[in-house]
Image (cartoon, rainbow, N blue to C red):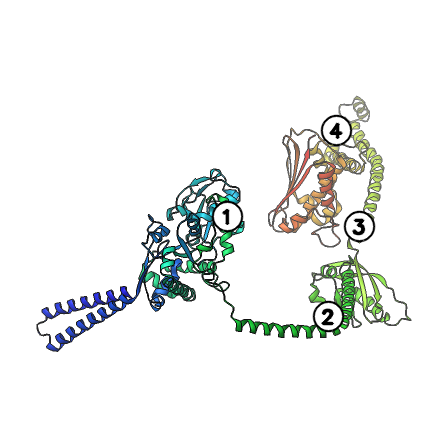
Amino acid sequence: MKVQTHQICYRVTNLKNRCLSEKNAAKKTSLFARVSLSLLFFSTLLLCAQNADANEDLDKVTLQLKWFHQFQFAGYYAALEKGYYKDEGLDLTIIERDLKLNPIDQVLEGKADFGVSNSEILLHYLHGEKVVLLASIFQHSPLVFISKNSPLLHSPHDFIGKKVLLSSDAQDIELRVLLKNEGISLNDISWIDRFASPEDYFDPYIDVLAAYTTNQPFYFENENKPYSIIYPSTYGVDFYGDTLFTSQKQAQQHPERVRKFLRASLKGWLYALNHQDEIIDVIIKKFGSLKSKKHLQFEAKKIQKLILPDLVKIGHSNPVRWQRISDSLKKLGMISDQKELSGFFFDPSTGRFVVKTETALYVTALFSIIILILALTIYIARKLKKEINSRKIIETKLKKSEKYYRSLFENTGTATVILTEDFYIKHCNENFAELSGFKCAEIENTKKWTEFVTQDELHRMREYALTRKDSKIPTPTSYDFKFLRRNGEIKNIHVYVERIDGSTDRVASLIDMTEKVKTQELLIQTEKMLSVGGLAAGMAHEINNPLAGILQGAQNIKRRISTDNKTNIEIARSKGCSCEQINDYLEERGVIRILDGIKNSGERAATIVKNMLDFTRRNESGRTGCDINTLLDGIIDLISCDYDLRKKYDFKHTEIIKEYAHNLSLTNCYRIEIEQVFLNLVKNAAYAMYETSKIRPPKLTLRTKADELYTIIEIEDNGPGMSNKVKRRIFEPFFTTKSPGLGTGLGLSVSFFIITQNHKGIFEVDSELGKGSKFTIKIPKV
């Protein structure tokens, strides 16, 4: 109020001086205006004098803060602003911290009546200094360690060898107790003994710094800089934070003044916590805080959690807790002997709740009513207990039974469904959902089982279902049918159907036999191929005999007309002509050309027969040294005679590019198996290139090379190529991209097995849609 009165006098004096200046400048000012101005001036001086006299009646006291103006001292600003000190007859002056002076010393030396400290105040008391605790404002200390350099530290034990900024001043006492309790000496860390400044917050040289949870974290969060906090309370060190104190002299000589000051201060804190933004504006406008409003709001939220006004009455001090803090100081070696704490407290009951007699009687009555209600409830509950227990037992059994059968239903390992009499699927398990391609929710009570049967099987399946209703008509309970999936794929399924006792529903278990059917078809096909192979070998032997006669006859004819044979010359002369004339005649009539054609065709047929014999002949000797280039040539010759390829894909119109390594050494391999791999790859390439033959001419590239470890064979086509999805599955058994009936899906999987398992080699594929595919085989040299 004293500050406000002086400000009013100052402003009115300035107003009078400004008005007098204007009067001198304006000569025509009216007499009425001059008289009014004089009256206003003297009235204001009278008001100021009265206020000054009023302030003279108040008891002047001073409060020494432990730091600069901020929300940390909001309760005292609020009490001053709202007139709580004046209501108690006090005229308070708040003194900001001078870093060169200790607030406790200021109070003890009489330069301030009251002060703000922390648990350090106990240390001064134990050292024999005449201090008295008035109230513990912060129930927990805001002092913590902050780790700010990467990697962040999360334990005091991580501090060893790190640069830690920690003041030796008693204000940081709880942090030193923390280190002591954890067995960490100041010699174990690189200790920087001073208070932290704003420049230290982002100094990479400092790893850890002592800080307030109400202050430094704001800077890190504002700059989005990661940090971690090590709380002393996590390690059993839980000291009080800010405390309000005075000297023993003040408490003894002016106890009533102390009580008035304490009441106003605690009342101010309660107001400040409930009106944070209002007091923040007061701190900024009237006390010139250096912190921004956003920073003060951050500080206010943190302080609310330290004071805990909803759990503990503001200012509460627990003597037992203060005794534990005393024990910690002794353990740290900061005091030599324990001291009785009774003289430390001004009023140990400050902040405590006092229970009145009326309140105690009310609570007792309420408690009795509650006991009566509980007793009545127990009495009723006992009557119902048997019935409830029996119901619980029944419910438990039902749940166990339901869970048991549900578990069986879901985990049979087969696709299982429960069917209604009108063909609807009542329940299905996940196996059936996976088989059908639908979700269970899309199937149950929505779809009929007839939707999963192909058209050619539907009539037979309906007949089974209808005759099954009549127990007198024998109906098969297990049979095969074709199952139609969501994507149109057809599966071979074997189904078991049984009626559920006591219900018209039926349970059906479906077993996917598709792979088994394919395997059976493959075995049959393999047997056929073995038979065809044997037949081909026999036919080749049979063809060889007349073929040899044809080639020998053609050769003998050529010898009989040769001009180099003396016998031919003599016989021709005896017949009245020469061998030259005979040859001229045969040449002119085309006989020689016909004989050459017979010879060439016969030799080509002999080569084909030889390739067939080589391909069908078993390799009894295991691995042999093979010329890879020759094997590829043999496969091309053999596949050129493939009737199916010639008829449908016209392989002879495919451009064959051979990029052979001419210095390629023999490769140790199973010849028959490698030929099988080459045959599969070339035939697949022919099928693929046929799909794009109308877009671009088919071109097949055969490439061989070698490095230090492998003989490398590349078979590359310019067909349609493969997507990444197909490429990932290309070596899976039974996977094929050909139309049904044109492939078993085993060619590449068998080839992959031959290369990777039998030859310990590498089989790779590189393909791009629209550009073609390249298969690379690497066979180890050794």
Q: Could you tell me which secondary element the residue under label 2 belongs to?
A: loop
| Cα distance in 3D space between marks 4 and 1 | 135 Å
Q: Is residue 489 above or below residue 584?
A: below
Q: Could you tell me which secondary element the residue under label 3 belongs to?
A: helix
Q: Which residue is mark 4?
A: 581
Q: Which residue is mark 3?
A: 519
Q: Could you tell me which secondary element the residue under label 1 belongs to?
A: helix
| Cα distance in 3D space between marks 4 and 3 | 68 Å
Residue flagged by tag 1: what amino acid is it? Answer: Ser
Q: Which residue is mark 1?
A: 328
Residue flagged by tag 3: what amino acid is it? Answer: Thr
| Cα distance in 3D space between marks 4 and 2 | 98 Å
Which is in the foreground here, disc 4 or disc 1?
Answer: 1
- Residue lying at the far bottom in this picture: please name it: 32
Residue at the spot x=41%, y=41% of the render?
A: 192
- Residue lying at the far front in this picture: please name it: 253
Estimate the x, y position of residue 266 in percent, counting from the top left.
Answer: 41, 64
Residue flagged by tag 2: what amino acid is it? Answer: Asn
Which is in the foreground here, disc 2 or disc 3?
Answer: 2
| Cα distance in 3D space between marks 1 and 3 | 81 Å
C-beta proximity under 8 Å, tags 4 and 3: no
Q: Can you tell which quarter of the image residue 502 is in?
A: bottom right
Q: Residues within 10 Å of mark 3 (few under 14, many from 20)?
A: some
Residue flagged by tag 4: what amino acid is it? Answer: Gln
